[in-house]
Image (tube, grey):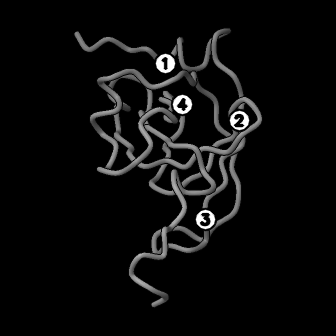
Amino acid sequence: MIPDVRRVVTGPMSRRFTVTHPGTNDWSSGGESSNRGVIHPADNDALEFLPEGTRIQDAIVIMAARRLSFGDVVPWHGENWRVTHAQDYSDYGYYYAVAVRAGAPASPDSGGFGNF
């Protein structure tokens, strides 16, 4: 039997949030949608999904009732987080995503290679 955690993702421990879909990609038209789920800081297992060079100390895990896509932006604790990894676990009642803090890069460009 496949465990269904839909009640956790939509139950009293979950919260509603707005997802901003960027219009800068080929697979979505942009805009906003509503979602519901559980969001928490990423653990070491989740950090394995982050691309090399991403700030590993600034990542969250989102278990959502509706699908999230690469590049989607989710607000959490007053900051915006950009989805960098998404998986479809709908057979288990949720969609899984890892997101990193959206905004400035971890360290500014040193300008060592000039202006290109």
Sequence-first tag of 4 and 1: 1
Q: Which of marks 2 and 4 is in front?
A: 2
Q: Is residue 78 above or below residue 52?
A: above
Q: Nearer the viewer, mark 2 or mark 1?
A: 2
To which residue does mark 2 refer? 17
Q: What residue type is labelled 1?
A: Arg
User: Which residue is located at x 30 percent, y 39 percent?
Assistant: 49
Q: Nearer the viewer, mark 3 or mark 1?
A: 3
User: Which residue is located at x 64 percent, y 30 percent?
Assistant: 36
Sequence-first tag of 2 and 4: 2
Q: Are marks 4 and 1 in contact (CB under 8 Å)?
A: yes
Q: Which mark is residue 6?
A: 1
To which residue does mark 3 refer? 22
Q: Is residue 114 above or below residue 9?
A: below
Where's residue 75, x and y in %? 69, 40
Sequence-first tag of 2 and 1: 1
Q: How far apart are marks 2 and 1 (CA)?
A: 16 Å
Q: Do the residues labelled 3 and 4 touch (CB within 8 Å)?
A: no
User: Which residue is located at x 71 percent, y 35 percent?
Assistant: 17
> For the residue labelled by badge 3, is the local secondary structure a helix, a strand or a loop?
loop
To which residue does mark 4 refer? 65
Q: Are marks 2 and 1 in contact (CB under 8 Å)?
A: no
> For the residue labelled by badge 1, is the local secondary structure a helix, a strand or a loop?
helix
> For the residue labelled by badge 4, is the local secondary structure a helix, a strand or a loop?
loop
